[in-house]
Amino acid sequence: MSNHTVGRKTSGLDKVLRFALYAVLIIVAAFYLMPFVVMLITSLKDVEEIRTGTLLSLPTSLHFDSWSKAWSGACTGSSCEGISPYLMNSFQIVIPAVVISTLLGAINGYVISLWKFRGSDIFFAALLVGCFIPFQVILLPMARTLGWLGIANTTMGLVFVHVIYGLAFTTLFFRNFYQSIPNELVKAARLDGAGFFTIFYRIILPVSTPIIVVTVIWQFTQVWNDFLFGVAFSGFDTQPVTVALNNLVNTSFGGKEYNVDMAAAIIAALPTLAVYVFAGKYFVRGLTAGAVKG
Amino acid sequence: MTSLFVILSSEASIMNTNATNSESSPIQSGRRARLSLADWMPKIVMAPTMIVTLVCIYGYMIWTAILSFTNSRMLPSYDFVGFDQYERLFNNDRWIVSLTNLGVFGGLFILICLFLGVVLAIFLDQKIRAEGAIRTIYLYPMAISFIVTGTAWKWLLNPTNGLEKMMVNLGFEDFKFDWLINPDMVVYCLVIAAVWQASGFVMALFLAGLRGVDSDLIKAAHLDGANTFTTYRRIILPSLKPVFFSALVILSHIAIKSFDLVAALTNGGPGYSSDLPANFMYAHTFTRSQVGLGSASAMIMLGCVLAILIPYLYSELRGERHE
């Protein structure tokens, strides 16, 4: 912001302050990095080294056994197949949930900002509340409903739940984005005989790429990281990876294998971390979209 | 789902012809055109979301509210017992502990995150070299699940092998750090892990806010002889009030619904000393067959969220109307 230097001279004090500033920033960065570094180091040690060493002592040689065990051999409650099956479960839940909720959000946002009807604003306000309710309030009724629909403990049931409770956010994102599109554009297209869907496909969707990316990333992270719905609505063989990880860490037959726990935790975190690293800009935009003047 | 889409798109083509017809007809028929399918299409398209919102958000809320007035145990029953469940709730030590924990955890978590967020954002706003890299490091925990965060910090804070051992090995032989197994201190472990996860996000919010401050205002302040500190205190920070309130609402929301962090980091223990309301609700509804009591606790949680949210939304909407 201060991209101007009104009467600024680099004095000695300035240099000291600047040095202190960098020192603080680097120390804080170390605080944020430390848990991940420790996880990585721990996952590469064997059990003996973990017992004798400390958090930051480096492994003498790299042990990848804990990684393969976390992937395909570690016990998560009832079975001992590692967390790879649950990783697949998570993908099977996340992909349809993200696609459907993004699509519906786009069309809802399109209506709310460009095809207003009586009550659409009130409805939008009512939907917004859905972004904020504590899900504990809907947990039990939803469990009953999934039972009635015959999709309790299934992947489909989890997709259904994630779509419903993701709609508030996806709609909000698209509505805010489409607010900036002038109404005249739609009016002109209507005069030319274009209908509701033609306008959506031909005019609106082609300019929506940034908000689609933001929404997809947001939903992906939300659904992937979900634990509450996963633990409440999944069956033994449909658990998402977060639930499996928690079971793995809290199951202790014999000695605790921290290296396996850490490897499993990193595996469970990798997909969202990868999204963050490769599309960080959009991730941040999603996070701040609702907050900084939505 | 697919059949619905087919219906919708076929109707779209009908609507198309309708629209062209009405355009070619004289102005008087405009009123008739207003009742055409074209005007129904937005409503038809929104209908699924509207129904789902009404049923699965508001309907379920009412359902849970009703259950909280019944003596439901393992399965919902509809024998009404008035406010008995609420009375039981507030006579239940575990609930009082979880509510107190929420106060301590939420209060500290919000305050520390706001403080760190503002300070780090201002620091990062001083034309820092490698700002992008530093920002990326500060924010990455937000991309991770609370379950992973909990797993990592459980290992770091573990009294036998974790930080304590590291400090002892470094020569601080009397260093003791057993918060994770100490019923009086365990709630602070939750604070540490949650701050680690969310403070970078608050920083990002404030940084975005700082970048949005009118630079002419700052130039003017500098011309008037204000130094950097005064400029921040008098001009920049006050203009960030909306960001501050947004962050406050988001953080309190995260605090109230915190469930996974406790599940992974402490599992509520030792005993139930680190339970939060969300964990109380889950345990009573799904594992302890106390649906009535669980529903009452869920309603209290909803009350907490609404107490924060309604004033916020009210001021936001009013602000929007004024613009």
Image (cartoon, grey):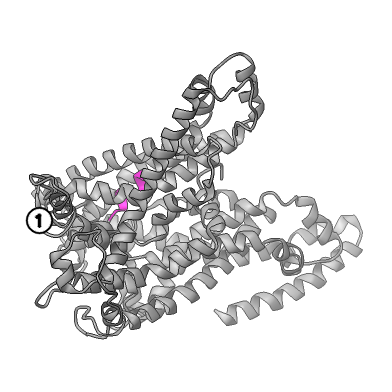
Which residue is the site of mark 1?
B270
- The quarter in which the C terminus of chain B is drawn is top right
The secondary structure type at the circle numbered 1 is: loop
Magenta-drawn segment: B251-258
x then y, percent, for residue B19: 81, 66
Residue B98 in sight in this render: no
- The quarter in which the N terminus of chain B is drawn is bottom right
Residue B81 in sight in this render: yes
B254 within the magenta span: yes
- In the displayed structure, does residue A287 sit left or right of residue B253? right
Residue at 58% from the left image edge and 49% from the top image edge: A121
Residue at 36% from the left image edge and 72% from the top image edge: A267
Give whichever of B37, A45 is nearer the camera.
Answer: A45
Q: Is residue B231 above or below residue B79?
A: above
| Pointer 1 chain | B
B249 within the magenta span: no
